[in-house]
Amino acid sequence: MSAKTSNAEFFERACRVLPGGVSSPVRAYRAVGGTPRIIARGEGAEVIDAEGRRYLDFVGSWGPLIGGHAPEEVVEAVCQAARRGSSFGAPCLAEVELAERVVEFYPGIEQVRFVSSGTEATMSAIRLARGATGRDLIVKFSGCYHGHADHLLVAAGSGLVTFGEPASAGVPRAFAELTRVLPLDDLQAVQELFEKEGQSIAAVILEPVPANNGLLVPAPGYLEGLRELTSRHGALLIFDEVITGFRVAPGGVAQRSGVTPDLVTFGKVIGGGLPVGAFAGPRRLMRHLAPDGPVYQAGTLSGNPLAMSAGLAALDLMAASNGWRQLEETGRQLDARLGPALAEAPFPITLVRLGSIFWLALGAESAPRSAEAIPERAADLFRPLFTGLLERGIMIAPSAYEVGFLSLAHRDEHFERLASATAEIFAAWPGTQPG
Ligand SMILES: *Cc1c(COP(=O)(O)O)cnc(C)c1O
Protein backbone atom coordinates (compact mmCIF):
# COMPACT_ATOMS: atom_id res chain seq x y z
CA MET A 1 0.00 0.00 0.00
CA SER A 2 1.40 3.37 -0.96
CA ALA A 3 1.23 5.87 1.90
CA LYS A 4 0.03 8.52 -0.52
CA THR A 5 -3.00 6.64 -1.84
CA SER A 6 -6.12 8.55 -0.82
CA ASN A 7 -9.54 7.24 0.15
CA ALA A 8 -10.86 8.69 -3.11
CA GLU A 9 -8.29 6.87 -5.23
CA PHE A 10 -8.91 3.60 -3.43
CA PHE A 11 -12.65 4.01 -3.79
CA GLU A 12 -12.27 4.64 -7.50
CA ARG A 13 -10.41 1.36 -7.80
CA ALA A 14 -13.09 -0.31 -5.70
CA CYS A 15 -15.84 0.98 -7.97
CA ARG A 16 -14.22 -0.65 -10.98
CA VAL A 17 -14.39 -4.14 -9.50
CA LEU A 18 -17.15 -4.00 -6.88
CA PRO A 19 -20.71 -2.83 -7.70
CA GLY A 20 -20.99 0.61 -6.09
CA GLY A 21 -17.50 0.10 -4.73
CA VAL A 22 -18.80 -1.96 -1.81
CA SER A 23 -19.69 -5.47 -0.67
CA SER A 24 -22.85 -4.29 1.14
CA PRO A 25 -24.90 -1.32 -0.11
CA VAL A 26 -25.24 0.95 2.95
CA ARG A 27 -21.47 1.31 3.06
CA ALA A 28 -21.58 3.38 -0.14
CA TYR A 29 -22.60 6.70 1.54
CA ARG A 30 -25.41 7.21 -1.00
CA ALA A 31 -27.72 8.66 1.69
CA VAL A 32 -25.17 11.20 2.88
CA GLY A 33 -22.93 11.90 -0.11
CA GLY A 34 -19.16 11.87 -0.21
CA THR A 35 -16.63 9.07 -0.40
CA PRO A 36 -16.63 6.23 2.10
CA ARG A 37 -13.46 6.01 4.13
CA ILE A 38 -11.38 2.97 3.25
CA ILE A 39 -10.53 1.42 6.58
CA ALA A 40 -6.99 0.14 7.04
CA ARG A 41 -7.34 -1.02 10.66
CA GLY A 42 -9.20 -0.64 13.92
CA GLU A 43 -7.93 -0.16 17.47
CA GLY A 44 -10.27 -0.16 20.44
CA ALA A 45 -12.83 2.60 19.87
CA GLU A 46 -11.10 3.96 16.76
CA VAL A 47 -10.65 3.13 13.09
CA ILE A 48 -7.81 4.37 10.90
CA ASP A 49 -8.39 5.05 7.21
CA ALA A 50 -6.18 4.59 4.15
CA GLU A 51 -4.80 8.11 4.60
CA GLY A 52 -3.81 7.39 8.19
CA ARG A 53 -6.60 9.52 9.66
CA ARG A 54 -8.17 8.29 12.93
CA TYR A 55 -11.87 8.31 13.66
CA LEU A 56 -13.72 7.71 16.87
CA ASP A 57 -16.00 4.88 15.77
CA PHE A 58 -19.64 4.40 16.71
CA VAL A 59 -20.36 2.03 13.79
CA GLY A 60 -18.69 -0.97 15.40
CA SER A 61 -18.93 -2.88 12.12
CA TRP A 62 -22.73 -2.39 12.39
CA GLY A 63 -23.02 -4.33 15.61
CA PRO A 64 -20.60 -7.23 16.01
CA LEU A 65 -17.74 -5.46 17.80
CA ILE A 66 -18.96 -5.40 21.37
CA GLY A 67 -15.38 -5.62 22.64
CA GLY A 68 -14.20 -2.80 20.36
CA HIS A 69 -11.74 -3.27 17.48
CA ALA A 70 -9.22 -6.09 17.74
CA PRO A 71 -9.49 -6.87 21.45
CA GLU A 72 -6.44 -8.87 22.51
CA GLU A 73 -8.49 -11.83 23.79
CA VAL A 74 -10.31 -12.32 20.49
CA VAL A 75 -7.20 -11.78 18.33
CA GLU A 76 -5.30 -14.34 20.38
CA ALA A 77 -8.12 -16.91 20.19
CA VAL A 78 -8.39 -16.54 16.41
CA CYS A 79 -4.63 -16.84 15.88
CA GLN A 80 -4.45 -19.97 17.99
CA ALA A 81 -7.43 -21.49 16.19
CA ALA A 82 -5.89 -20.71 12.78
CA ARG A 83 -2.76 -22.61 13.73
CA ARG A 84 -4.89 -25.66 14.51
CA GLY A 85 -6.53 -25.53 11.08
CA SER A 86 -9.21 -23.28 9.68
CA SER A 87 -11.94 -25.72 8.69
CA PHE A 88 -12.62 -29.44 8.96
CA GLY A 89 -16.10 -30.12 7.62
CA ALA A 90 -16.63 -32.18 10.76
CA PRO A 91 -17.85 -31.37 14.26
CA CYS A 92 -15.32 -29.34 16.24
CA LEU A 93 -14.76 -28.51 19.90
CA ALA A 94 -15.37 -24.79 19.63
CA GLU A 95 -18.85 -25.13 18.11
CA VAL A 96 -19.99 -27.35 20.97
CA GLU A 97 -18.58 -24.91 23.49
CA LEU A 98 -20.19 -21.90 21.82
CA ALA A 99 -23.53 -23.72 21.57
CA GLU A 100 -23.31 -24.57 25.27
CA ARG A 101 -22.68 -20.92 26.05
CA VAL A 102 -25.68 -19.85 23.95
CA VAL A 103 -27.96 -22.38 25.64
CA GLU A 104 -26.73 -21.25 29.05
CA PHE A 105 -27.23 -17.54 28.29
CA TYR A 106 -30.52 -17.43 26.39
CA PRO A 107 -33.85 -18.36 27.99
CA GLY A 108 -35.91 -21.26 26.68
CA ILE A 109 -33.51 -22.77 24.15
CA GLU A 110 -31.90 -26.20 24.14
CA GLN A 111 -30.27 -26.52 20.74
CA VAL A 112 -28.43 -24.27 18.32
CA ARG A 113 -27.70 -24.53 14.58
CA PHE A 114 -24.80 -22.41 13.38
CA VAL A 115 -24.72 -20.66 10.00
CA SER A 116 -22.48 -17.93 8.58
CA SER A 117 -24.67 -14.80 8.56
CA GLY A 118 -27.77 -13.27 10.09
CA THR A 119 -29.54 -13.60 6.76
CA GLU A 120 -29.00 -17.34 6.75
CA ALA A 121 -30.18 -17.55 10.36
CA THR A 122 -33.55 -15.87 9.72
CA MET A 123 -34.03 -17.63 6.38
CA SER A 124 -33.46 -21.01 7.99
CA ALA A 125 -35.55 -20.23 11.08
CA ILE A 126 -38.45 -19.39 8.76
CA ARG A 127 -38.07 -22.68 6.93
CA LEU A 128 -37.96 -24.52 10.25
CA ALA A 129 -41.09 -22.68 11.45
CA ARG A 130 -42.92 -23.65 8.27
CA GLY A 131 -41.71 -27.23 8.44
CA ALA A 132 -42.60 -27.61 12.11
CA THR A 133 -46.09 -26.08 11.83
CA GLY A 134 -47.00 -27.26 8.34
CA ARG A 135 -48.16 -23.70 7.57
CA ASP A 136 -46.88 -21.26 4.94
CA LEU A 137 -47.67 -17.68 5.99
CA ILE A 138 -45.14 -15.46 7.73
CA VAL A 139 -45.92 -12.21 9.53
CA LYS A 140 -43.32 -9.45 9.72
CA PHE A 141 -43.42 -5.76 10.62
CA SER A 142 -42.49 -2.71 8.64
CA GLY A 143 -39.47 -1.16 10.31
CA CYS A 144 -37.85 -4.53 11.05
CA TYR A 145 -34.97 -5.87 8.96
CA HIS A 146 -34.20 -9.57 8.86
CA GLY A 147 -31.51 -9.82 6.22
CA HIS A 148 -32.03 -10.24 2.49
CA ALA A 149 -33.75 -13.63 2.04
CA ASP A 150 -36.63 -13.53 -0.47
CA HIS A 151 -39.47 -14.08 2.00
CA LEU A 152 -38.24 -11.36 4.31
CA LEU A 153 -37.35 -8.72 1.74
CA VAL A 154 -40.97 -7.74 1.60
CA ALA A 155 -42.66 -4.40 2.22
CA ALA A 156 -46.20 -3.57 3.24
CA GLY A 157 -48.67 -3.71 0.36
CA SER A 158 -50.70 -0.63 -0.40
CA GLY A 159 -54.35 -0.05 0.44
CA LEU A 160 -56.50 -2.95 1.53
CA VAL A 161 -54.31 -5.86 0.46
CA THR A 162 -52.63 -7.40 3.46
CA PHE A 163 -50.03 -9.43 1.58
CA GLY A 164 -46.63 -7.95 1.03
CA GLU A 165 -44.94 -6.45 -2.02
CA PRO A 166 -41.41 -7.38 -3.06
CA ALA A 167 -39.02 -4.87 -1.46
CA SER A 168 -36.38 -5.63 -4.07
CA ALA A 169 -36.25 -6.42 -7.73
CA GLY A 170 -35.73 -10.14 -8.14
CA VAL A 171 -38.06 -11.19 -5.32
CA PRO A 172 -40.95 -13.07 -6.96
CA ARG A 173 -44.39 -11.67 -6.18
CA ALA A 174 -45.50 -15.23 -5.41
CA PHE A 175 -42.97 -15.37 -2.53
CA ALA A 176 -43.92 -11.94 -1.21
CA GLU A 177 -47.55 -12.99 -1.13
CA LEU A 178 -46.75 -15.51 1.59
CA THR A 179 -45.51 -12.72 3.84
CA ARG A 180 -47.92 -10.43 5.68
CA VAL A 181 -46.47 -7.07 6.68
CA LEU A 182 -47.99 -5.13 9.58
CA PRO A 183 -47.12 -1.85 11.30
CA LEU A 184 -45.26 -2.07 14.60
CA ASP A 185 -46.87 -0.87 17.83
CA ASP A 186 -50.34 -2.05 16.78
CA LEU A 187 -51.46 -5.25 18.51
CA GLN A 188 -54.96 -4.73 17.16
CA ALA A 189 -53.66 -5.21 13.60
CA VAL A 190 -51.97 -8.46 14.60
CA GLN A 191 -55.11 -9.69 16.33
CA GLU A 192 -57.26 -8.91 13.29
CA LEU A 193 -54.87 -10.75 10.99
CA PHE A 194 -54.90 -13.80 13.27
CA GLU A 195 -58.69 -13.77 13.38
CA LYS A 196 -58.74 -13.88 9.59
CA GLU A 197 -55.79 -16.12 8.73
CA GLY A 198 -54.54 -17.57 12.03
CA GLN A 199 -54.85 -21.17 10.79
CA SER A 200 -52.28 -20.53 8.07
CA ILE A 201 -49.71 -18.49 9.97
CA ALA A 202 -46.48 -20.38 10.65
CA ALA A 203 -44.69 -17.62 12.51
CA VAL A 204 -44.49 -14.00 13.53
CA ILE A 205 -40.94 -12.71 13.22
CA LEU A 206 -39.70 -9.46 14.67
CA GLU A 207 -36.72 -7.72 16.14
CA PRO A 208 -37.98 -7.56 19.73
CA VAL A 209 -36.38 -4.11 19.92
CA PRO A 210 -36.13 -3.05 16.27
CA ALA A 211 -32.73 -1.47 15.59
CA ASN A 212 -32.52 -1.32 11.80
CA ASN A 213 -34.90 1.57 11.16
CA GLY A 214 -34.10 3.74 14.09
CA LEU A 215 -34.27 2.21 17.54
CA LEU A 216 -37.97 1.51 18.05
CA VAL A 217 -38.36 0.48 21.67
CA PRO A 218 -41.76 -1.22 21.99
CA ALA A 219 -44.43 -0.07 24.42
CA PRO A 220 -44.82 -2.08 27.62
CA GLY A 221 -47.03 -5.09 26.96
CA TYR A 222 -46.37 -5.24 23.22
CA LEU A 223 -44.11 -8.31 23.24
CA GLU A 224 -46.38 -9.99 25.81
CA GLY A 225 -49.32 -9.35 23.47
CA LEU A 226 -47.52 -10.98 20.54
CA ARG A 227 -46.54 -13.91 22.73
CA GLU A 228 -50.17 -14.43 23.73
CA LEU A 229 -51.60 -14.12 20.21
CA THR A 230 -49.10 -16.47 18.60
CA SER A 231 -49.50 -19.11 21.32
CA ARG A 232 -53.27 -18.96 21.11
CA HIS A 233 -53.22 -19.54 17.34
CA GLY A 234 -50.51 -22.20 17.25
CA ALA A 235 -48.04 -19.94 15.42
CA LEU A 236 -44.39 -19.61 16.42
CA LEU A 237 -42.92 -16.39 17.75
CA ILE A 238 -39.44 -15.74 16.35
CA PHE A 239 -37.23 -13.10 17.94
CA ASP A 240 -34.61 -11.86 15.52
CA GLU A 241 -31.92 -10.94 18.00
CA VAL A 242 -29.15 -10.61 15.43
CA ILE A 243 -28.38 -7.13 16.81
CA THR A 244 -29.66 -7.39 20.36
CA GLY A 245 -28.51 -10.95 21.16
CA PHE A 246 -25.58 -10.99 23.63
CA ARG A 247 -25.51 -7.18 23.41
CA VAL A 248 -28.33 -5.85 25.55
CA ALA A 249 -27.96 -8.74 28.04
CA PRO A 250 -26.51 -12.27 27.96
CA GLY A 251 -30.03 -13.44 27.17
CA GLY A 252 -30.88 -10.58 24.82
CA VAL A 253 -34.26 -8.87 24.80
CA ALA A 254 -35.87 -12.13 25.96
CA GLN A 255 -34.01 -11.80 29.24
CA ARG A 256 -34.70 -8.08 29.59
CA SER A 257 -38.40 -8.35 28.75
CA GLY A 258 -39.17 -11.71 30.32
CA VAL A 259 -40.88 -12.76 27.06
CA THR A 260 -39.51 -16.01 25.64
CA PRO A 261 -39.84 -16.69 21.90
CA ASP A 262 -40.17 -20.14 20.31
CA LEU A 263 -37.19 -19.59 18.02
CA VAL A 264 -34.43 -17.02 18.12
CA THR A 265 -31.90 -15.89 15.54
CA PHE A 266 -28.42 -14.55 16.25
CA GLY A 267 -25.63 -12.93 14.28
CA LYS A 268 -23.21 -10.03 14.75
CA VAL A 269 -21.98 -10.25 18.39
CA ILE A 270 -22.12 -14.07 18.41
CA GLY A 271 -19.26 -14.16 15.88
CA GLY A 272 -16.92 -11.78 17.70
CA GLY A 273 -16.33 -9.97 14.37
CA LEU A 274 -16.14 -13.11 12.20
CA PRO A 275 -19.00 -14.35 10.00
CA VAL A 276 -21.38 -16.28 12.26
CA GLY A 277 -25.12 -16.58 12.52
CA ALA A 278 -27.23 -19.04 14.47
CA PHE A 279 -30.79 -20.01 15.13
CA ALA A 280 -31.94 -21.81 18.21
CA GLY A 281 -34.94 -23.16 20.04
CA PRO A 282 -36.25 -25.95 22.22
CA ARG A 283 -35.58 -29.54 21.14
CA ARG A 284 -39.26 -30.06 20.26
CA LEU A 285 -38.75 -27.61 17.37
CA MET A 286 -35.07 -28.12 16.53
CA ARG A 287 -35.64 -31.87 16.08
CA HIS A 288 -37.42 -31.06 12.79
CA LEU A 289 -34.03 -30.04 11.32
CA ALA A 290 -31.96 -32.41 9.20
CA PRO A 291 -30.45 -34.86 10.02
CA ASP A 292 -32.96 -35.50 12.86
CA GLY A 293 -35.95 -34.30 10.85
CA PRO A 294 -37.19 -33.41 7.37
CA VAL A 295 -36.33 -29.66 7.27
CA TYR A 296 -33.16 -29.39 5.21
CA GLN A 297 -30.46 -26.90 6.08
CA ALA A 298 -26.67 -27.12 5.72
CA GLY A 299 -23.41 -25.17 5.32
CA THR A 300 -19.84 -25.99 4.29
CA LEU A 301 -18.35 -23.41 6.67
CA SER A 302 -21.09 -23.60 9.33
CA GLY A 303 -19.61 -23.92 12.82
CA ASN A 304 -16.25 -22.86 11.40
CA PRO A 305 -13.59 -23.24 14.10
CA LEU A 306 -12.02 -19.79 13.58
CA ALA A 307 -15.38 -18.08 13.73
CA MET A 308 -16.54 -20.17 16.69
CA SER A 309 -13.34 -19.33 18.59
CA ALA A 310 -13.83 -15.63 17.95
CA GLY A 311 -17.42 -15.80 19.18
CA LEU A 312 -16.45 -17.73 22.27
CA ALA A 313 -13.64 -15.31 23.08
CA ALA A 314 -15.98 -12.32 22.69
CA LEU A 315 -18.64 -13.85 24.96
CA ASP A 316 -16.02 -14.90 27.50
CA LEU A 317 -14.57 -11.40 27.45
CA MET A 318 -18.02 -9.98 28.15
CA ALA A 319 -18.67 -12.45 30.96
CA ALA A 320 -15.23 -12.08 32.55
CA SER A 321 -15.30 -8.27 32.55
CA ASN A 322 -18.94 -7.97 33.63
CA GLY A 323 -19.27 -6.37 30.24
CA TRP A 324 -23.06 -6.04 30.21
CA ARG A 325 -23.05 -4.02 33.40
CA GLN A 326 -20.12 -1.92 32.15
CA LEU A 327 -21.98 -1.12 28.92
CA GLU A 328 -25.06 0.02 30.86
CA GLU A 329 -22.83 2.45 32.73
CA THR A 330 -21.09 3.50 29.51
CA GLY A 331 -24.51 4.19 28.00
CA ARG A 332 -25.44 6.43 30.92
CA GLN A 333 -22.19 8.38 30.38
CA LEU A 334 -23.21 8.89 26.76
CA ASP A 335 -26.61 10.24 27.87
CA ALA A 336 -25.01 12.59 30.37
CA ARG A 337 -22.53 14.05 27.86
CA LEU A 338 -24.65 14.14 24.74
CA GLY A 339 -27.97 15.17 26.34
CA PRO A 340 -27.01 18.82 26.97
CA ALA A 341 -25.53 19.21 23.45
CA LEU A 342 -28.70 17.85 21.87
CA ALA A 343 -30.83 20.20 23.94
CA GLU A 344 -29.10 23.10 22.12
CA ALA A 345 -29.99 21.76 18.67
CA PRO A 346 -32.00 24.05 16.36
CA PHE A 347 -34.64 21.29 16.05
CA PRO A 348 -36.01 18.61 18.36
CA ILE A 349 -33.90 15.49 18.84
CA THR A 350 -34.65 12.48 20.99
CA LEU A 351 -31.74 10.32 22.09
CA VAL A 352 -33.08 6.76 22.23
CA ARG A 353 -30.90 4.18 23.94
CA LEU A 354 -31.07 0.58 25.03
CA GLY A 355 -27.87 -0.44 26.81
CA SER A 356 -25.08 -0.08 24.26
CA ILE A 357 -27.36 0.70 21.29
CA PHE A 358 -28.28 4.32 20.68
CA TRP A 359 -30.08 6.34 18.05
CA LEU A 360 -30.63 10.02 17.43
CA ALA A 361 -34.26 10.46 16.40
CA LEU A 362 -33.84 13.72 14.48
CA GLY A 363 -36.88 15.96 14.40
CA ALA A 364 -38.71 13.78 16.94
CA GLU A 365 -40.19 15.15 20.18
CA SER A 366 -40.36 11.66 21.67
CA ALA A 367 -39.07 8.17 20.93
CA PRO A 368 -40.84 6.74 17.84
CA ARG A 369 -42.29 3.25 18.26
CA SER A 370 -42.91 2.50 14.58
CA ALA A 371 -41.32 3.24 11.22
CA GLU A 372 -44.29 5.49 10.39
CA ALA A 373 -43.64 7.62 13.50
CA ILE A 374 -40.14 8.68 12.36
CA PRO A 375 -40.26 12.29 11.10
CA GLU A 376 -39.83 12.49 7.34
CA ARG A 377 -37.27 15.26 7.55
CA ALA A 378 -34.91 13.07 9.62
CA ALA A 379 -32.81 12.21 6.55
CA ASP A 380 -32.35 15.89 5.62
CA LEU A 381 -31.41 16.84 9.16
CA PHE A 382 -28.98 13.94 9.32
CA ARG A 383 -26.70 14.87 6.41
CA PRO A 384 -25.01 17.97 7.89
CA LEU A 385 -24.68 16.24 11.25
CA PHE A 386 -23.02 13.20 9.69
CA THR A 387 -20.66 15.26 7.55
CA GLY A 388 -19.79 17.59 10.42
CA LEU A 389 -18.92 14.67 12.67
CA LEU A 390 -16.85 12.95 10.00
CA GLU A 391 -14.88 16.17 9.41
CA ARG A 392 -14.21 16.23 13.15
CA GLY A 393 -12.93 12.64 13.17
CA ILE A 394 -16.08 10.95 14.43
CA MET A 395 -17.70 8.15 12.46
CA ILE A 396 -21.35 7.21 12.79
CA ALA A 397 -23.29 5.01 10.36
CA PRO A 398 -24.11 6.89 7.12
CA SER A 399 -27.90 6.98 7.44
CA ALA A 400 -30.46 8.66 9.68
CA TYR A 401 -32.07 5.27 10.26
CA GLU A 402 -29.02 3.45 11.55
CA VAL A 403 -28.21 3.10 15.23
CA GLY A 404 -24.85 3.62 16.92
CA PHE A 405 -23.01 1.01 18.95
CA LEU A 406 -20.96 1.33 22.12
CA SER A 407 -18.27 -1.17 23.01
CA LEU A 408 -16.11 -2.07 25.98
CA ALA A 409 -13.49 0.28 24.48
CA HIS A 410 -15.66 3.42 24.69
CA ARG A 411 -14.88 5.84 27.52
CA ASP A 412 -16.35 9.02 28.93
CA GLU A 413 -13.70 11.11 27.13
CA HIS A 414 -15.02 9.80 23.81
CA PHE A 415 -18.50 11.07 24.66
CA GLU A 416 -17.05 14.41 25.66
CA ARG A 417 -15.53 14.64 22.17
CA LEU A 418 -18.78 13.58 20.55
CA ALA A 419 -20.76 16.12 22.59
CA SER A 420 -18.46 19.05 21.86
CA ALA A 421 -18.32 18.21 18.15
CA THR A 422 -22.12 17.99 18.09
CA ALA A 423 -22.48 21.32 19.89
CA GLU A 424 -20.10 22.96 17.37
CA ILE A 425 -22.08 21.58 14.44
CA PHE A 426 -25.38 22.85 15.85
CA ALA A 427 -23.89 26.27 16.60
CA ALA A 428 -23.02 26.62 12.90
CA TRP A 429 -26.16 24.87 11.64
CA PRO A 430 -27.15 25.86 8.08
CA GLY A 431 -29.82 28.57 8.21
CA THR A 432 -29.52 29.40 11.90
CA GLN A 433 -28.17 32.66 13.29
CA PRO A 434 -25.22 32.51 15.64
CA GLY A 435 -25.82 33.73 19.13
C1 LIG B 1 -27.85 -7.54 10.40
C2 LIG B 1 -29.18 -8.17 10.61
C3 LIG B 1 -29.59 -9.30 9.88
C4 LIG B 1 -28.79 -9.84 8.73
O1 LIG B 1 -27.55 -10.29 9.16
P1 LIG B 1 -26.36 -10.40 8.05
O2 LIG B 1 -25.25 -11.04 8.83
O3 LIG B 1 -26.09 -9.01 7.61
O4 LIG B 1 -26.87 -11.26 6.97
C5 LIG B 1 -30.77 -9.90 10.23
N1 LIG B 1 -31.53 -9.43 11.23
C6 LIG B 1 -31.18 -8.35 11.94
C7 LIG B 1 -32.04 -7.89 13.06
C8 LIG B 1 -29.99 -7.67 11.64
O5 LIG B 1 -29.67 -6.57 12.31
Image: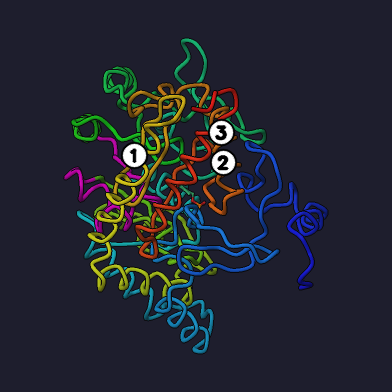
Badge 2 local density, few (<14 within 10 Å), some, or many (20+)?
Answer: many
Dot 1 or dot 2: first in sequence order is 1
Q: Secondary structure at mark 3?
A: loop
| Identity, as a three-letter code, of the amino acid under mark 3 | Ala
Instruction: Report the Cα–Cα distance between label 1 and label 3.
Output: 18 Å
Instruction: Report the Cα–Cα distance between label 1 and label 2.
Output: 17 Å
| Identity, as a three-letter code, of the amino acid under mark 1 | Gly
Q: Position of residue 195 (x, y in %)?
A: 27, 18
Compared across the picture, whether 256 is left or right of 210 comes to left
Residue occupied by mark 2: 386
Q: Residue at x 44, y 43 (%)?
A: 403
Q: Are marks 1 and 2 in contact (CB under 8 Å)?
A: no
Q: Residue at x 70, y 64 (%)?
A: 51
Dot 3 or dot 2: first in sequence order is 2
Q: Is residue 428 magenta?
A: no
Residue occupied by mark 1: 339
Q: Secondary structure at mark 1?
A: helix
Q: What segment carries the magenta color?
A: 232-260
